[in-house]
């Protein structure tokens, strides 16, 4: 779907054919999931401790600090960067943190939500930091994964592919002058009541209507 198609509730019926001969046993699926998660952990470790340090001429210990920083982001709901506090937690220089966040973003580990896309190189102030996608959030956050954060991560991950997404002053996200509030099926419209072009992005509903 295009962005406009989503806004105007365009729907398309998709026929799904099931091949029951390909259904695997639950025990095999469980083992496959464990192996898959181990592979993902290895990719994260390789990216944080080898790829980024080699690219940025860092030492191994700095790479491990990047991994610790990623863990801090994963446990936050969502992560609002306070540079002085983060620098002390990870034991790095505050002046280096912006570069570290950018390396992690370019490597596909995190996504930074800014307050504008204007200015030098189109980079505004960082308001929130999300893990790049919900899979990373579930993998690193485990039982502490917050469903509200997962929803925002999912929306941000999808919409930033072809749109400039910035933080909204009234709600969660702003895209092309439109404001989006993300939540569950019971999410109300209080936060966007004063916004001219406001939408509620709800989870756990079958279809949308009007500005939902």
Image: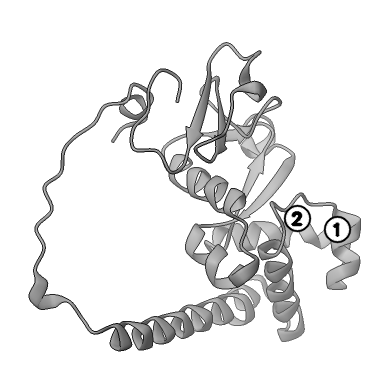
The residue carrying mark 2 is: 98
- Determine whether label 2 and label 1 are within 8 Å by CB: yes
Q: Secondary structure at mark 1?
A: helix
The vertical placement of 98 against 62, above or below, is: above
Q: Residues within 10 Å of mark 1 (few under 14, many from 20)?
A: few
The residue carrying mark 1 is: 95
Residue in the image at 30% along x and 27% along y: 5
For this view, does 45 lie left or right of residue 62?
left
Q: Quadrant of residue 169?
A: top right
Residue projecting furthest to the front:
186
The vertical placement of 11 against 81, above or below, is: above
Q: Quadrant of residue 60?
A: bottom right
Q: Is residue 11 visible?
A: yes
How many badges with numbers are in the image?
Answer: 2
x and y percentages locating residue 163 in the rendered image = 46, 34
Quarter of the rendering occupied by the C terminus:
top left
Q: Quadrant of residue 62?
A: bottom right
x and y percentages locating residue 82 in the rendered image = 85, 52
Residue in the image at 63% along x and 34% along y: 172
The residue nearer to you, when weighing 107 against 188, is 188
The residue nearer to you, when weighing 91 against 154, is 154
């Amino acid at each position: 779907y295009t962005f406009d198609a989503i806004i105007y509730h365009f729907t398309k019926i998709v026929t799904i054919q099931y091949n029951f001969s390909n259904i695997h046993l639950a025990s095999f699926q469980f083992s496959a999931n464990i192996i898959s998660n181990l592979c993902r952990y290895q990719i994260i470790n390789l990216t944080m401790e080898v790829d980024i340090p080699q690219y940025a001429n860092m030492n191994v210990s700095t790479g491990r600090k990047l991994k610790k920083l990623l863990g801090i982001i994963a446990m936050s709901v969502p992560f609002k960067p306070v540079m002085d506090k983060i620098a002390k937690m990870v034991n790095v220089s505050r002046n280096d943190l912006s570069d570290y966040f950018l390396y992690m973003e370019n490597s596909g580990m995190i996504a930074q939500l800014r307050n504008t896309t204007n200015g030098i190189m189109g980079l505004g102030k960082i308001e929130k930091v999300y893990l790049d996608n919900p899979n990373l959030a579930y993998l690193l956050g485990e039982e502490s994964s917050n469903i509200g954060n997962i929803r925002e991560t999912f929306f941000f991950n999808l919409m930033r592919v072809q749109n400039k997404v910035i933080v909204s002053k009234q709600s969660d996200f702003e895209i092309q002058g439109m404001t989006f509030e993300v939540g569950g099926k019971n999410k109300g419209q209080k936060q966007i009541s004063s916004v001219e072009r406001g939408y509620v992005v709800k989870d756990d509903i079958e279809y949308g209507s009007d500005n939902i």
